[in-house]
Amino acid sequence: IGGGDLATRVTMRGSREMRELAATINGMAAGLERAEAARRNLMADVSHELRTPLAVLEGNLQAALDRVYPLDDAGVANLYQQVRHLIRLVNDLRELALAESRQLPLQRGPLDLSLLAAETVQALEPLAVEQGVRLTVAAGSPTPIGADTDRLRQVLFNLLSNALRHTPPGGEV
């Protein structure tokens, strides 16, 4: 256990005290094993959460450099939103740990789901173009709901970026 093999368990025979000591050591090893698994999951989650807006920024900037996508005021505003999103993610690292323990507080408020979907698609459009995938949104009239805007934005970004990653060129999301 001391060498890092947290799956090791101690077996002792003898007095009740020795068996209790073995059970205590095994309990501590199991706790360390769970903590290590949670740490690995947190690192994977953090990496995933940061990668999506960074990919959007990279795709937008590369498309602008290649003159595929004009970088007008709206494009700069979109990139600014992505940077703000990254800042929020970095500030939310502690909250990610809370999410892992199912204790993440939600900041519910009014939200237009159609507008959020359209904004998310617009942000990911350069990445879709780069990958040869058609990305569309079929949003009708405003769809007001009560939700945590930042969390729902994360969900939409993750879903769409995963869909783009796994859709072959010529496909549609």
Image (cartoon, rainbow, N blue to C red):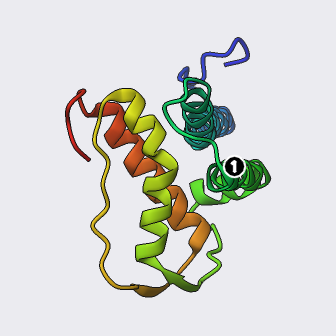
Q: Residue 139 at what x, y percent from top left?
A: 32, 72
Find residue 18 and report its horizontal and vertical position in percent.
66, 32
Residue 107 visible at all: yes
> Which quadrant holds residue 107?
bottom right
Label 1 element class? helix
Of residue 36 and residue 84, the one placed in the foreground of this image is 84
Q: Is residue 107 left or right of residue 162?
A: right
- Residue 8 rendering spot, x and y as whole percentages: 55, 20
Q: Nearer the viewer, residue 103 or 139?
A: 139
Q: Residue at x 65, y 48 (%)?
A: 72
Residue at the limit of the structure toward the top, as seen here = 3
Q: Residues within 10 Å of mark 1 (few under 14, many from 20)?
A: some
Residue found at the far left of this picture:
171
Q: How many marks?
A: 1
Q: Residue at x 63, y 42 (%)?
A: 71
Q: Residue at x 62, y 75 (%)?
A: 106
Residue 33 appears anywhere in the view:
no
Q: Quadrant of the N terminus?
A: top right
In this picture, is 120 found above or below 22?
A: below
Find residue 38 and report its image quarter: top right
Label 1 is placed on what type of residue? Val
Is 156 placed above or below 69 here? below
Decide which of 148, 67 is in the foreground and name it.
Answer: 67
Q: Position of residue 169 (x, y in %)?
A: 24, 27
Residue 96 falls left or right of residue 132 = right
Q: Nearer the viewer, residue 141 or 31?
A: 141
User: Which residue is found at the position 49% from the left and 69% from the top?
Assistant: 116
Q: Which residue is mark 1?
A: 76
